[in-house]
Structure formats: C-alpha cells, structure tokens
Image (cartoon, helix red, strand yellow):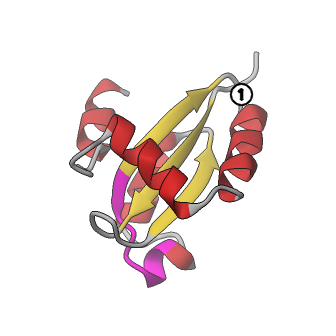
Amino acid sequence: MEKPGFVYIMANRRNGTIYLGATSDLVKRAWEHRNGLVEGFTKRYECYLLVWYEACDSIESARIRERQMKEWKRAWKIREIEGLNPEWEDLYEALRTIA
C-alpha cells in the first residue's frame, strides 16, 4: 500500500513570500520548516507558517500536483490559499492535533 502524499504552502506572513512543496509526512515536514531545520529557501525567507495543504492519494500524485502548481502564477496560488485559509492562519497546530 502506497503512502498518501501532501502538497503544501509555507509563508512568512500574509501575502508575503511563499514556498510550495510536497511530502509524505506533512506534520514532520512542517515542523522541520518551522524550526529552521530545512536549509534553503524556507529558512532564508523565514517561511515558517503552514498556510495551505492538499492531501493526495500518493506521494507521486502529490509531486505531480506540486510540479503543476509551481507553473502557476502567484495570484493563482494566493487564491488557493485564501480559498482554504482566508486569514492566512498557521494551520500547523490544528493539523498536529488531528494527525
């Protein structure tokens, strides 16, 4: 049985810098970003807020969705975020309690 996957967006603030990624363990990966353990973009730009995510059937389908969304215009990504999370609240704590 294949593990489910997730596509997610981290941000540094509302309408600020955003990062789009894919993972098979969203709670762990968001925790790593939040604590500055992931070298690179999210650490450099302090994208520590989990503002959007989408569950997929598999990690491969999550990676496909991530590649599609990386081609999107920024405005489309913001529309996705605000469709799920209009206030750009950090979803990590709520996610952590249900995981």
**Residue extending farthest top:** 1
Q: Position of residue 91 (x, y in %)?
A: 29, 43
Q: Is residue 20 above or below residue 68?
A: below
The image quarter containing residue 10 is bottom left
Locate residue 51, reporting x and y percent: 36, 50
User: Which residue is located at x 67 percent, y 22 percent?
Assistant: 57
At 73% across and 47% down in the image, what residue appears? 68
Indicate the quadrant where residue 49 lies: bottom left
Q: Which residues are magenta?
A: 42-50
Above or below, comparing residue 57 to residue 59 in the picture: above
User: Residue at left 34%, top 44%?
Assistant: 82
Residue type, mark 1 in image: Ser
Residue 38 sits above or below residue 95 on the image: below
The answer to if 88 sits in the magenta stretch is no
Residue 22 appearing in the image:
yes
Quadrant of res 47 = bottom left
Q: Position of residue 56 (x, y in %)?
A: 63, 27
Look at mark 1 in the image and give the residue it sits on: 58
Report the label total: 1
Q: Residue at x 37, y 76 (%)?
A: 46
